Image (spheres, grey):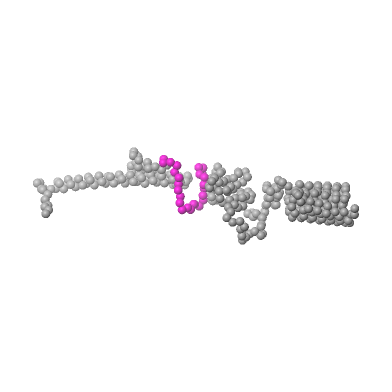
């Protein structure tokens, strides 16, 4: 066996069967069968089976143990190594972390199964947790994929977006959508058939200037809603029935209405301005109350019309009596003969 020059071997049986040159092996059994050159192995049995592999760097207990002919590989960590059917001959492969394994060439593996990788954070909470350090910036740039790039897949309904914690999630614009809010509360939105459903026990707030969110409501909107059509559902006929027009309805006298208005400053059955400001306005109930007032006005007009008809008849009788009293005694109305 001929050992080439410029080797440094430190440790029991380090480079025991080595023939290559320009290698540095530190640790018991490192580079045991090495024939390659320009390798640096540090740790017990690091690069133990390396045969003709060149320019490899293995650091850690049994790191790069199974590499044989692979070139320019880097393994950092206890038992960081190659794996898979072609493991002995991978090139330009990197595995970093205890038990990290790489199975293809030209690849970088960080950690083993279950390991979270953090960039800009010391407490990663996901497989890749990126903290840019700048507000409202992801810190992730895809230089060759910009807004000007053509879409490679058309007419698809799924897309990537982020949730409340910044996790990248798969979303959809059709009925398969399910967007999670955060890991503690679970998903606040889901679909039921063709409908998007809010599943939380509270309400939905749209806008930032809403000071009050009273109980009993599920949607709070600032600034207003613009729509071409609104249809309000009514639960039963009790909430919308023509009770004013029903037989037996006790219609207030106008004198009673006048007294109520003078005392309270608003119509009976209609909330005051202060109440509306405090409690809001139920559109369906208010429309029903306004209809009630319209029907009451109609009854007042019907009564007035009935009184007018009776008065007209009474006036006609009185006028006839007056005319009859003014006629001379024995007067007969002339008879008009027709040919």
Q: Which residue is at the far right?
A: 1
| Residue 264 visible from this viewpoint | no
Q: Hey, which quadrant is residue 275 in on the image?
A: top left
Magenta stretch contains residue 61? no
Magenta stretch contains residue 224? yes
Q: Residue at x 58, y 48 (%)?
A: 177
Please name whichever residue, 100 or 156, is drawn nearer the observer in this view of the structure. Answer: 156
Query: What is the x, y in percent for residue 9?
Result: 87, 51
Q: Residue at x 71, y 49 (%)?
A: 117
Q: Hey, which quadrant is residue 23 in on the image?
A: bottom right
Q: Residue at x 88, y 56 (%)?
A: 4
Q: Quadrant of the C terminus?
A: bottom left
| Residue 291 visible from this viewpoint | yes
Q: Residue at x 35, y 40 (%)?
A: 246
Q: Which residue is at the far front?
A: 85
Q: Which residue is at the far left?
A: 330
Q: Where 201 falls versus 69 (above or below)?
A: above
Q: Which range is magenta?
A: 214-238
Indicate left or right for 273 with 201 as reference. left
> How many marks overall?
0
Query: What is the x, y in percent for residue 128?
Result: 68, 50
Please name whichever residue, 332 or 179, is drawn nearer the observer in this view of the structure. Answer: 179
Indicate left or right for 274 with 45 as reference. left
Indicate left or right for 24 with 262 as reference. right
Indicate left or right for 73 with 194 as reference. right
Secondary structure mostly seen in magenta is loop
Query: What is the x, y in percent for residue 97?
Result: 75, 48
Query: What is the x, y in percent for residue 185?
Result: 60, 43
Q: Hey, which quadrant is residue 263 in on the image?
A: top left
């Amino acid at each position: 066996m001929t050992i080439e020059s410029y080797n440094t071997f430190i440790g029991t049986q380090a480079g025991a069967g080595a023939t290559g040159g320009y290698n540095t092996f530190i640790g018991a059994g490192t580079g045991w069968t090495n024939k390659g050159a320009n390798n640096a192995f540090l740790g017990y049995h690091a690069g133990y089976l390396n045969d003709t592999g060149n320019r490899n760097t293995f650091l850690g207990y049994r790191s790069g143990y199974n590499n044989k002919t692979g070139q320019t590989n880097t393994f950092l960590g206890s038992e960081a190594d190659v794996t898979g059917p072609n493991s002995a001959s991978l090139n330009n492969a990197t595995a970093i972390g205890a038990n990290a394994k790489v199975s293809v060439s030209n690849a970088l593996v960080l950690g083993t199964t279950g390991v979270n990788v953090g960039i800009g954070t010391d407490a990663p909470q996901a497989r890749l947790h990126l903290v840019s350090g700048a507000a409202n910036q992801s810190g992730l740039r895809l230089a060759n994929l910009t807004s000007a790039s053509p879409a490679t897949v058309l007419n698809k309904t799924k897309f990537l977006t982020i949730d409340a914690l910044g996790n990248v999630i798969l979303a959809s614009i059709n009925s398969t959508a399910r967007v999670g809010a955060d890991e503690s509360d679970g998903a606040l939105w889901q679909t039921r058939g063709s409908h998007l459903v809010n599943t939380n026990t509270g309400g939905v707030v749209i806008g930032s200037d809403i000071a009050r969110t009273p109980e009993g409501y599920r949607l709070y909107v600032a600034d207003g809603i613009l729509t071409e059509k609104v249809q309000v559902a009514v639960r039963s006929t009790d909430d919308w029935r023509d009770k004013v027009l029903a037989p037996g309805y006790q219609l207030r006298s106008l004198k009673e209405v006048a007294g109520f208005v003078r005392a309270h400053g608003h119509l009976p059955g209609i909330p005051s301005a202060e109440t509306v400001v405090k409690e809001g306005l139920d559109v369906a109930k208010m429309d029903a109350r306004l209809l009630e007032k319209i029907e009451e006005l109609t009854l007042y007009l019907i009564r007035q019309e009935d009184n007018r008809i009776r008065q007209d008849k009474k006036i006609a009788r009185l006028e006839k009596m007056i005319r009859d009293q003014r006629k001379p005694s024995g007067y007969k109305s002339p008879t008009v003969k027709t040919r």
